Image: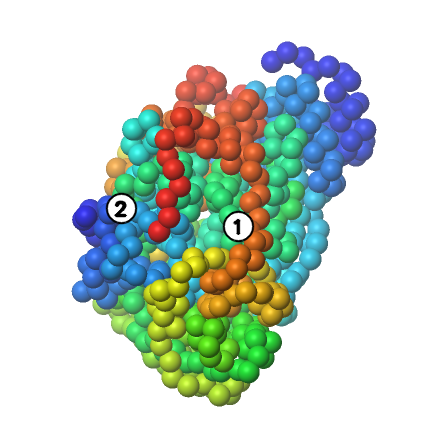
Amino acid sequence: MAAIAPSFFSELRAICGDDGVITQSERLMVYECDAYTMEKHLPDAVALPRTTEEVVRAVKLCAQHHLPIIPRGTGTSLSGAVLAVDGGIIIGTTRLNRILNVDYRNRRALVEAGVPNLWITNAVKERGLMFAPDPSSQPSSTIAGNIAFNAGGPHTLKHGATTNHVLGFDLVLPDGEVVWLGSTPEGGDDVEGYDLRGAVIGSEGMFGVITRVVVRLMKTPRAFRTMLAVFNSADDASHTVSDIIAAGIIPVAMELMDQPITRAIEEAYHFGLPMDAGAVLIIELEGHEAGLDRQLERVIELCRKNRSRDLKPARTPEERAALWKCRKSAFGAIGRISPNFVTQDGVVPRTKLPEIMQFIYDAAKKLGLGVANVAHAGDGNIHPIIFYDERIEGDVEKAYACSTAIVRRCIELGGTATGEHGIGVEKVELMSLQYSADDLEAMQRLRRAFDPEGRCNPHKMFPGGKRCLNFNPQRQVAI
Amino acid sequence: MSIVSYAPDDLTVTVTADTTLAALQQHLSPRNQWLPVDPPNPARLTIGEIVNCDVSGPRRYGYGTVREHVLSLRAELADGRMIKSGASVVKNAAGYDLCRLFTGARGELATVREVCFKVQPRPEAEQFGKAEFPTVEAACGFVEKLDTSELTPTVLDLHNAGGAGPWTVVVGFAGTREEVDWQRKQTGSLAAVADANLDHDEQFWSATAARPVRKLSVLPSKLAATIAAMRGVTSLVARAGNGIIYYRGEDQGTAIVPSTKLMQRLKHEFDPAKKLQARHA
């Protein structure tokens, strides 16, 4: 890419303030990747605007200089979707972090794009409300980041993902024009015309920069039954999940954790998880107190039918919180057992869960890699965590091969390459397995309507881009 | 007209666009499942029409519009090419969500040919109740009480009995027998509630009025004031919990069409020769 005119940086500083522009290479390293660490690229600069107006001015400046813009929240995404592949300017939303208004009567909140997911629920929980999507990254991942990937979480099974809970937002298009998509803060739920809101959700930040969002708040369920079911094998646990759904019961969450991950969590945090279990399921039912126990009995019956050797109900809110902490600490515990890991995010029809679990174990074994599994089992959404050590020659490639083989198998089984982490740079080559050239071309039409120049978050999602020709991690994390 | 595939244990079904909603529901019924979308005239409405217009019925309050239930679809582009969007699984973040874009686009961007839905187990129990009020303000006060209570109705409608009767709130609950009984009982402590059904909606839509049905969408908090300010309206049904008002009578004309330029660019990308005209259910 041609050198950037020095005047660009001084103009950017004039817009975002000296403390709102990063250009020093050691500080830019923070922005060289997201939570997918297999590939890294330094941006030319990072802009951290504080207002919608600053975003607009920064985006217009980049447009004048024909520079790529890369919207970024806190970088918790897991597919390399915020990499500055060909350089460019990262527009960070972390200083847009205010909850602007909570409308309790209409159960909505207006928040800035960089507000972390969990802040919203924390702000409204005393009034019995919550923001439903609950990715494990929720203490830090931002609402605009959740929109970019249509983030889900363990409770997606019943409550749906981000697209079901975000009513509208503004979007600064790559040329600097601001449009409001979907429901406005003062407007009703239904908006005439195409669902552009829905089209932007899950578009991985390729259509522009979001600065303000209207979210729907849900009534927090009053009663829960949360249970840890212990199994001798991942296979038994997987069959239990299918049986519960087939019985017409939709728990709010059914999370599977296999032996390696259960052990890692237990060794790190001492929650009291069984170290010798083949797999455990965290099953949660919620709703009104009336009728919950009868549903729980039926669930217990189905666990027993699948040879569950132990069933531990959470008897207090503290015990329930501890169970969820176990699940959400999973990724943090990996550091104890492997210097590096890569996680996958494929989805299969839930009846294929036993089959894909077996495939994962076989694929890792064949390559001599370790693997641990957490899964949003009720959704058929797997998160195999493949261990590697970048210091060992060939390990990165092996991990990549293993992870790719798993996703290929998910697609063959009628599923998808990603349930919530996105395509990013990581899975671009898999897009053509899942979609035809015509399917991808139709997606490009949508992109052109928003970003005719293809300047917003380029080299993502679509195969055949520049990045694919020279996949070669430039520099790995410090050892 | 056909069911392409049905995987009851995965809670997914794929149907061609010319299948009627009633035929789909009938196919799901032996496994005690349904697509929880209840627009008027299910025996006549096709899946294509339902998706084109993103329809819903009284149960919208509990289950959303059809958009919330589409997992994937096949559509014919204006140039004749068939494309697929989404996957037959409940979660999918691969690629842009063309399903959302095409749902509700009235066939102007592509012609929907086949749709895969996420279906649900039919609730074990479902009950409806109604309460009548002398004024729209009083009726909306009851709506607000329900909407902000711990109860979780699946129906929260308001109607004026074809323009003739009192303001009536219809509330519905679904779920296990115990929770439905409990919620119904709680509702009775907020107002005098009589047993009811969803006939009010059918009567509104089947009325042979000369004037077409129009729609307004407002914040639920503004429902009472909006209805009170309406002039020349004969009959109305509101999805009170959602702030959606369907009415017959003079156009109250407040539909906002935002981002028009962007929509025109989209139309141009998908149908440059303007072959695809808007279709209505």
Q: Can residue A202 be spotted in the picture?
A: no
Residue A303 in the image: state x and y as whole percent. Answer: 28, 66
* Secondary structure type for disc 1: loop
**Camera-side residue of B278 and A19:** B278
**Camera-side residue of A294 and A451:** A451
- Amino acid type, callout 1: Val
Count of residue discs: 2
**Camera-side residue of A218 and A264:** A218
Cα separation between marks 1 and 2: 24 Å
Numbered mark located on residue A191 in the image: 1
* Secondary structure type for disc 2: loop
Q: Are marks 1 and 2 in contact (CB under 8 Å)?
A: no
The residue carrying pointer 2 sits among few (fewer than 14), some (14 to 19) or many (20 or more) residues within 10 Å by Cα, namely many
Location of residue A252 by image quarter? bottom left
- Residue displayed at 49% across by 80% down: B166
| Position of B77 relative to B14 (above/below) | above
Q: Which residue is mark 2?
A: B17
Residue B253 in the image: state x and y as whole percent. Answer: 56, 54
Residue sticking out furthest to the front: B210
- Residue displayed at 32% across by 76% down: B125
Q: Can residue B280 be spotted in the picture?
A: yes
**Camera-side residue of A3 and B78:** B78
Mark 1 chain:
A
- Residue displayed at 29% across by 32% down: B82
| Position of A72 relative to A272 (above/below) | above
Residue A272 in the figure: left or right of residue A82: left
